[in-house]
């Protein structure tokens, strides 16, 4: 069973990525390759790419983040910039 703080970190990263404006393939790649979330890889591989698109759309329209998570810029964003 994952530590609560590890699960929270994963959920924060997922929400941040879903609201980032990145393409769903990049979001899935980030979640599958980030070493911090190795224990969630099998779960992430079950994600339907179309549902990731829908989640991104919903995040863009309805979600409000109180404070953006501090992501390692180069590891999460290919251009090195936060979009």
Image: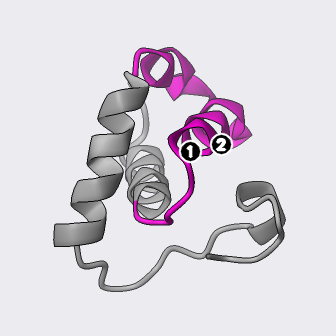
Q: Give me the disc on residue 30.
A: 2
> Do the CB atoms of the residues marked 2 and 1 lie less than 8 Å apart?
yes
On the image, numbered disc 1 is attached to which residue?
A: 27
Place of residue 10 in the rendered image (x, y in percent of width and height, measured from the top left) = 46, 47
Kindly state the secondary structure of the residue where label 2 is placed: helix
Real-space Cα separation, disc 2 to disc 1, in angstroms: 5 Å
Q: Nearer the viewer, residue 9 or 18?
A: 18
In the picture as drawn, the residue positioned furthest to the bottom comes out as: 67
In x, y percent, where is residue 63? 21, 70
Image: magenta residue range: 19-47
Q: Residue at x 65, y 35 (%)?
A: 29
Answer few, some or many: residues within 10 Å of disc 2's Cα (few below 14, many 20 plus, some between 14 and 19).
some
| Horizontal arrangement in the rendering, residue 64 relative to residue 69 (left or right) | left
- The total of numbered circles placed on residues is 2
> Given the current orientation, which residue lies at the most extreme left position?
62
In the rendered image, residue 73 lying in the magenta stretch gets the answer: no
Whether 81 is drawn above or below 15: the answer is below
Residue 58 falls in image quadrant = bottom left
- The residue at 63%/43% (across/down) is 26
Corner quadrant of residue 15 = bottom left
**The N terminus is located in which quarter?**
top left
Question: In the rendered view, does 38 fall on the left or right side of 50?
Answer: right
Horizontal arrangement in the rendering, residue 12 relative to residue 60 (left or right): right
């Amino acid at each position: 069973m994952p530590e609560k703080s590890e699960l929270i970190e994963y959920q924060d990263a997922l929400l941040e990525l879903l609201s980032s404006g990145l393409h769903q393939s990049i979001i899935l790649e980030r979640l599958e390759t980030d070493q911090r979330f190795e224990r969630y890889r099998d779960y992430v591989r079950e994600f339907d790419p179309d549902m990731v698109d829908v989640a991104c759309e919903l995040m863009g329209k309805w979600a409000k983040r109180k404070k953006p998570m501090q992501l390692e810029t180069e590891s999460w964003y290919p251009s090195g910039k936060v979009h």
